[in-house]
Image (spheres, rainbow, N blue to C red):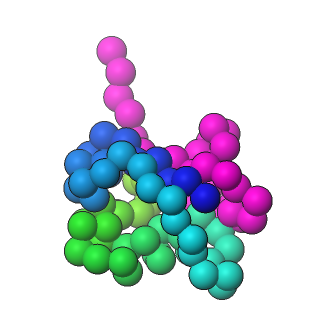
Amino acid sequence: MKALYFAWVRERIGRAEEEISPPPEVATVGELIAWLKSRDEAYALAFENAAVIRTAIDKAHVRHETPIAGAREIAFFPPMTGG
């Protein structure tokens, strides 16, 4: 699946997108975030406060307990502010 990173998540990881293949035991968005955090220090920093990270699967906003099975694209972004 393709992972997309936005704003400071992208800046901390150092890339805007990548193809990822999480292991089969990673079944939800929250588990995916935990798996990403374990990859290296940049991911750990980007996802250090996972509760504030917003996620979309195939362009639809989802909660961290949402299953990732069948997802083609998962986007991660921090809370947005507007004006």
Q: Return the x and y of residue 55 as percentages of the image width and height.
A: 54, 49
Residue 62 seen in the current view: no
* Along the viewing direction, whichever of 15 and 48 lies nearer the viewer: 15
Instruction: Decide whether the magenta segment is chiefly helix, strand or loop.
Output: loop
Q: Residue at x 66, y 43 (%)?
A: 58
Q: Is residue 71 left or right of residue 12?
A: right
Q: Is residue 80 magenta?
A: yes
Q: Residue at x 59, y 64 (%)?
A: 29
Q: Residue at x 51, y 47 (%)?
A: 75
Range drawn in magenta: 55-83
Q: Is residue 7 magenta?
A: no
Q: Which residue of the protein is positioned furthest toward the front in this rendering?
A: 19
Q: Quadrant of the N terminus?
A: bottom right
Q: Return the x and y of residue 13 as percentages of the image width and height.
A: 28, 58
* Along the viewing direction, whichever of 41 and 15 lies nearer the viewer: 15
Q: Quadrant of the C terminus?
A: top left
Q: Return the x and y of residue 79 as percentages of the image width and height.
A: 39, 41
* Along the viewing direction, whichever of 83 and 29 lies nearer the viewer: 29
